[in-house]
Amino acid sequence: MSAVYASVIGKEFAAGVTLDDANRIVRVASSMPSLSSLQVGMVVRSISGVPVGDGRAEQARHHSNRSQVLVVLGTPAKDEFDLDSDEDTEADFKPPTSLPPLLPEFHNAVAQNSSSVIYDATVKCGPGGCVIIMSEGANPALPITLAAVKAKAEVMYIDTVARMKTRQTIDNAGGMLKKSLEKGLWIYVEQATKSITFLRQVSDCINEVKASGKMHATARVLLMCEPHPHFPEALMRGSVTLRSRLQNNNAAEVDVREELSESTHRKLAIHGDDMAPGETAAKPEVTATRKKVRISNQVSIVQLEKSTFMEMSASAKLTAEPTASGEGITRVAKYSFGSNEKFISLSYVRDHRFAVGTNSGYVVLIDRDGLPLIQFRPHKACIWDVSFASQFDFATACEDGTSAIYNYSLTNQELTTVSVASFQNDVFAVTYADPSDVNSAVLSGGLSATVCVLHSDRQNSSFIACRTSIQAMCATQKKQVIVGGGTGACTLIDANYCVVTDITNAHNKKVPAVGSHGSVAVTGGFDCTLRLWDVRNGFHLTSQQQLNEVITAVAVNDRYVSACSGSSLFVWDPRMMDRTLAMKTNAWRDLTRGLVLDGNIIVTASVDGVARIWEVN
């Protein structure tokens, strides 16, 4: 899509424009003059420099705003990566997603100064180099366009989210990227860290074009990014890192963070683990709501009793295949939701029932026999974590930047959104302070390095700044919460007083796996180490095990300690951690982020799209 800039009155934009779920304009009020440049079919990308996720919610913010706001929109265009839709020649090649010239009123002082910073960065990084712009709530499209005018360069604009929604293949994208680099274009990728796969493709294309000797002298890649732990390091080599943030007048200002000129600090900032001294992490916005949705519109539902299992979703399926045994472990059941669905998170519900979160925003409840009980779709993005306090009350941590609390009713067939905390980045972890109490505080966090504590009234909240991204959470018996961090730091938080009571840096790489039972806690990380702790009074190490691969999930109960490491499932007796009690190698493909212990039953939920139920012999 090509970009269009429109200066409109905020109040008129809120009242006179109707958007659909994809932020596409479906109606424009002709009676409002400031909206004359808007057309049906345009897609809202940002408002006053702020990238738009939920367009309707952003409109509501401006319902009483009588001043002008700058709206960046995408206009309908043909496939942005379709190399065959144009009969272009080598001489007149021009991608269909170029940014148009700006109107004179947008040539303000902030934009001009920011464009100079971007221009200098493109000169510094050289042909095929990357300018990484860390977005702090501001879209740098305006200064990028001005810098391109100064450099006499054409800009190809790519919206990562729009590209993913149209499901264009990576190979097709690579063809256009390489052609653009060979022709000397600037490639501007908005919301680049929404697709790490696409960023890896960008990196590969740069290397291929350089190796072939076809890189044009004016070719550059500009990436609008948020911190992400898996940002490709190859793109950081030789790059220049900038920062884009909102000024008081809602203009996007781009500057150079001095501490980012040193490679270590830059890497930490891009990976989401950096906070400069004195800086305060951005606080999530918490909204109390009682929005109700008829479950029949969102879910395929059956009663929880086994006698009524036959009313299943058409997409859900129970896969029967021979059991698989390992040393002391036997798989007794298996469940998959759909051929393209990946299982990302797992939570214990109650009465031997479990909830699986998927990459497409579904939550599916299953039992120990691998039979699905109920499914619904509270989000339309990846659910990184899910936590249940009862069979009717749960909280989610989502890729869409929100942590939400839900209540569902089988009697009324309604799914109610109780409260939503909106972060600016992915939310990786969520937990109730007391998983047996639906009214206990709910803690959540992610890339923004802030833990949000939503109190029992679901209106008041507290915030705890961390110096690292939040990777995982779990509650202890004393209503404290263990937090696994992106740098390897593990934090113990008192949920009642909203204070940090202890921190350990025993892990030296990120910790995506935490669990607890009674006074025992277990942590596992990318340092391939499993650690057991006594957490009655802070962190006190009691045992540790070194494994061969990274640990992505852990669990503990009164009988067993379990861990997912690479493609293997491990079980120990917590009283004899010096030897493995049971092990199953090649238990799944890819990796497993979900692990729950229920007596001698183990449930795993894997990225290969399969939930497996195991029995410890």
Image (cartoon, grey):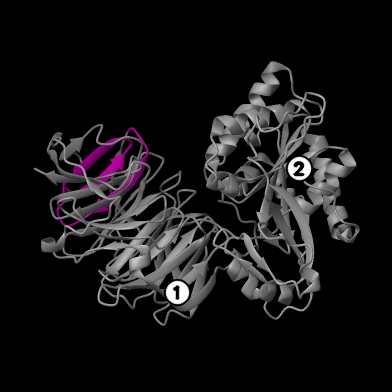
Where residue 7 sits, quadrant-wise, is: bottom right
> Which mark lies nearer to you, 2 or 1?
2
> Which residue in the protein does label 1 denote?
419
How far across and how far down the image is residue 188, in percent?
A: 71, 42
49 vs 295: above or below: above
For image coordinates 16% across by 47% down, the residue present is 573
How far across and how far down the image is residue 107, in percent?
A: 89, 57
2 or 1: tag closer to the N-terminus: 2
For image coordinates 33% across by 78% down, the residue present is 439
Residue 574 appears anywhere in the view: no
Q: Is residue 194 left or right of residue 217?
A: left
Residue range corresponding to the magenta coloring: 548-577
What crowding class fits label 2: few (fewer than 14 Cα within 10 Å), some (14-19), or many (20 or more)? many
569 falls in the magenta region: yes
425 vs 149: above or below: below
Q: CA distance from mark 2 to mark 1?
A: 40 Å
Q: Is residue 493 left or right of residue 354?
A: right
